[in-house]
Amino acid sequence: MTSAASFPPGRQDTLVIGGRMDADRALLTPRGELVRGCAQMLAAKLAELPAGTARVDLDMSGVHFMDTAGLEFLDVLRDHARRRSMPVTTSRWSGQPRRILELAGLDTTDPLRTPAPCPSPAGSAVALERQERLHLLQEEVEQLRQAIASRPVIDQARGVLMATYGCSSDEAWHILREASQLSNTKLRTVAESLTACAEAEGTPPPPEVRTALARALARRAPR
């Protein structure tokens, strides 16, 4: 009783929905990411449940990332509960998905208990608040995506600093952050410059990054 979603090429974390039946109760366990395609996959999964199913409960502890498509996932569950006149719950949200629920104004213990926002006039306070929540949600998702994409090169740069200057992993992280701030350069760009410099026949970082790294290293030099 397991299904896997099909996502755009390049994604490493698919969504897998496992589950089992306990008498007339379906226990579903999604694992992975709630992104584009997850709502369609869930709808297909629900359609496969036995005819005698009287309740559906989802354990969301295995979901470690979601974007706005996760709200469509919840809409599918609401629609299933309404059409089949049965209880449907989601529980054990944590980490980044829980934060997205908070930004969307939903109950983090079970967002299906929170009524879906009703359409409101464009100029009303409710509509404006909902628009602001969605904007914050989209910003948070994009920031996390960028952090995930940047992590490998940042980890490499930390390794270069640790090997070259004998600093700890935390010290290397702070050096990179300070160099980024001092040079007004994105952290990922500083990390890329440093790792490129460490390669055979590598090119030195731009002057402003080189100067900022030197200042950051000097501030943390033993006294």
Image (cartoon, grey):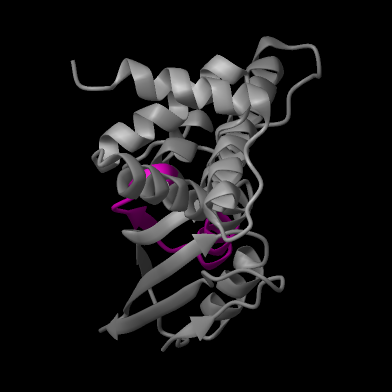
From the viewer's perspective, is residue 46 above or below residue 84?
A: below
Residue beneath the point at 41% across and 60% down:
63
Left or right of residue 139, residue 59 in this image:
left
Residue beneath the point at 66% across and 70% down:
10
The C terminus is located in which quarter? top left
Q: Which residues are magenta?
A: 76-96
Q: Quadrant of residue 38?
A: bottom right
From the viewer's perspective, is residue 78 above or below residue 122?
A: below
Can the viewer see residue 25 in this picture? Answer: yes
Q: Nearer the viewer, residue 157 or 29?
A: 157
Q: Quadrant of residue 220?
A: top left
Where does the image place residue 98, in percent across and percent down from the top left?
39, 42
Left or right of residue 219, residue 106 in this image:
right
In the displayed image of the protein, which residue is found farthest to the front? 201
Residue beneath the point at 41% across and 56% down:
64
Q: Quadrant of residue 142?
A: top right
Where does the image place residue 14, in percent across and percent down from the top left?
54, 72
In the displayed image of the protein, which residue is found farthest to the right? 122
Q: Nearer the viewer, residue 209 or 85?
A: 209
Q: Is residue 86 magenta?
A: yes
Q: Nearer the viewer, residue 60 or 218?
A: 218
From the viewer's perspective, is residue 2 above or below residue 222?
A: below
